[in-house]
Image (cartoon, grey):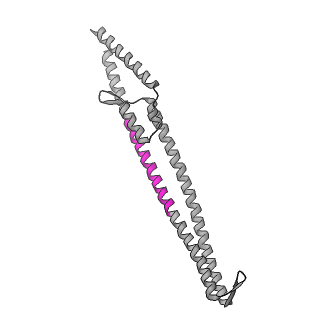
Amino acid sequence: MKKITYLVLTASLLTSTTLISQNNSVAQPELDSGTIEQQFDYIITKSTSYKEFQLIRKSSILKIKAHTLDSLKKIQKDLVAVTSSTSKTKANISQLETEVTTLKNEIETISKDVDSISFLGAPLSKASYNSVVWLIIGLLLLGLLIFVGLYKKCNISTVRAQNDLEKINNEFETFRKKALTKEQETMRKLQDELNKNHS
């Protein structure tokens, strides 16, 4: 009776090993396209069951890991680009504020010195000159507002990218812990079965 059980167990192990090795050689184009979430869904649907456990191919896990790391690198690269853009925007805003202050000081000095001013070779009254200068200041302030808006937009993008990165890290860590737990439980059960068979 033990010999029959041993033969059946050996035959089933050889058959499952052959099937698993054949499945590992099959191309998995679904893992090379789609979002990370779609790739995880594909792995879950294509995994095989052993008792209450889902068995997932190591090659699939490695592909998902590579794709996840690529996504994280891209997000980090985008984050660096946004941070750089934010610094440039801050520098531009500071420069514009300095220019506005300088222009205001020049306007006050010129207003005190002269009632009539020559602007681009044409004489202008003080009121006309002030109108032109305030128009320039208005344009600079408009530019400042545009830069402030761009800064806020970049800041929102940075926060969103950081949140996405944290979410992906949390999902990956959860998945890794679950996979490790399942692997340990499967190995324990296999060892128990081997111990029973040797007894």
Q: Is residue 122 left or right of residue 197?
A: right
Residue at 47 percent of width and 34 percent of height: 63
Q: Main secondary structure of the magenta part?
A: helix
Q: Is residue 99 left or right of residue 180?
A: right
Given residues 141 and 164, the one toward you in this image is 141
Magenta-drawn segment:
152-178
Q: Does the magenta run of residues contain 162?
A: yes
Q: Is residue 153 above or below residue 96?
A: above
Q: In the picture, which quadrant includes the C terminus? A: top left
Given residues 119 and 87, the one toward you in this image is 119
Q: In the picture, which quadrant includes the N terminus? A: top left
**Residue 112 visible within the image:** yes
Residue at 53 percent of width and 51 percent of height: 78
Q: Quadrant of residue 114?
A: bottom right
**Residue 176 visible within the image:** no
Q: Is residue 107 above or below residue 86?
A: below
Q: Name the residue at the front extreme.
A: 122
